[in-house]
C-alpha cells in the first residue's frame, strides 16, 4: 500500500506521465480520421497512427530502461505526428467534396498541426521550455470545433422539431376515417 502511495505521490511519476501523454495528443485525431476516410487514405492514416504509437512505445521503453533517447523520440514524435496531421487534414479536405463533416473537420486538424509544429520548432530551438505545458494548447482547435459542431447540431435539432410540429397536424387530419367530423 505504501509503495503505491509513494509512486502516485511522486513528482517524478507525474512529470513522466505528463511528458509521455503529450506524445499521444494527436492519436485521437488520427483515430477519428480513420473512421471518416475511406480506401487508400484510410490505410495511409492507419500507417501514420501505427508509427505514432511506436514513438509512444519507444518513449515508454526509454523511460523504463533509461536508454537516453527521450529527446530524440520527442522531437521525432512531434514532427511525425504534426506533419501526419497536415496530411490527414488534406485527405479530409479532399474527401470533404462528398461529405461536409470531413471538410469541416479538416480545418481544426490543420490548425492543431500548425500549432504543434510551431510549438515543436520553438521548443527545438530553445524559445520555450518543453516542460511548460504549451503542448496542451493543441487541444484548443478541436475544442472550438466540438463546440461549433454541438451548436450546429442543436440548431438543426430545433429546426427539425419545428418542422415536425408543423407536419403533425396535417398527418393527423389525413389519418381520420371518413364520415367522422374532425
Image (tube, rainbow, N blue to C red):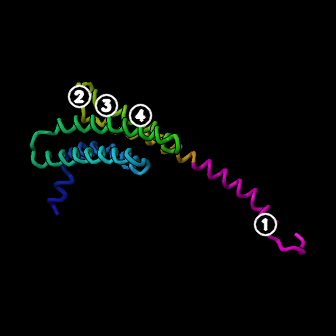
Q: Nearer the viewer, residue 65 or 133?
A: 65
Q: Which numbered disc, 4 or 2, marks the residue that appears first in the sequence?
A: 4
Residues rendered magenta in the picture: 153-182
User: Mark 2 Cα within 10 Å, few/some/many (few <14, many 20+)?
Assistant: some
Q: Position of residue 15 (x, y in %)?
A: 22, 44
Residue 145 is left or right of residue 73, and the answer is right
Q: Which numbered disc, 1 or 4, marks the residue that appears first in the sequence?
A: 4
| Mark count | 4
Q: Are marks 3 and 1 in contact (CB under 8 Å)?
A: no
Q: Which mark is residue 111?
A: 4
Q: Are marks 3 and 2 in contact (CB under 8 Å)?
A: no
Q: Residue at x 32, y 48 (%)?
A: 46
Q: Which residue is mark 1?
A: 172
Q: Which residue is mark 3?
A: 119
Gap in Å between the C-alphas at discs 1 and 2?
Answer: 68 Å
Q: Which mark is residue 124?
A: 2
> Element under label 4?
helix
Amino acid at each position: 500500500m505504501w509503495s503505491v502511495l509513494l509512486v502516485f505521490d511522486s513528482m517524478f511519476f507525474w512529470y513522466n506521465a505528463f511528458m509521455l501523454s503529450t506524445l499521444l495528443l494527436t492519436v485521437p485525431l488520427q483515430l477519428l480520421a480513420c473512421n471518416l476516410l475511406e480506401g487508400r487514405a484510410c490505410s495511409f492514416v492507419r500507417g501514420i497512427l501505427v508509427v505514432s504509437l511506436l514513438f509512444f512505445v519507444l518513449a515508454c521503453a526509454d523511460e523504463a530502461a533509461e536508454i537516453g533517447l527521450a529527446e530524440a523520440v520527442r522531437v521525432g514524435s512531434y514532427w511525425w505526428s504534426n506533419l501526419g496531421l497536415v496530411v490527414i487534414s488534406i485527405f479530409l479536405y479532399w474527401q470533404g467534396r462528398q461529405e461536409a463533416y470531413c471538410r469541416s473537420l479538416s480545418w481544426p486538424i490543420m490548425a492543431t498541426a500548425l500549432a504543434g509544429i510551431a510549438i515543436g520548432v520553438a521548443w527545438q530551438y530553445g524559445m520555450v521550455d518543453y516542460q511548460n505545458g504549451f503542448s496542451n494548447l493543441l487541444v484548443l482547435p478541436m475544442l472550438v470545433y466540438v463546440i461549433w459542431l454541438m451548436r450546429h447540431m442543436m440548431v438543426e435539432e430545433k429546426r427539425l422539431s419545428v418542422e415536425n410540429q408543423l407536419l403533425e397536424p396535417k398527418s393527423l387530419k389525413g389519418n381520420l376515417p371518413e364520415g367522422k367530423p374532425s
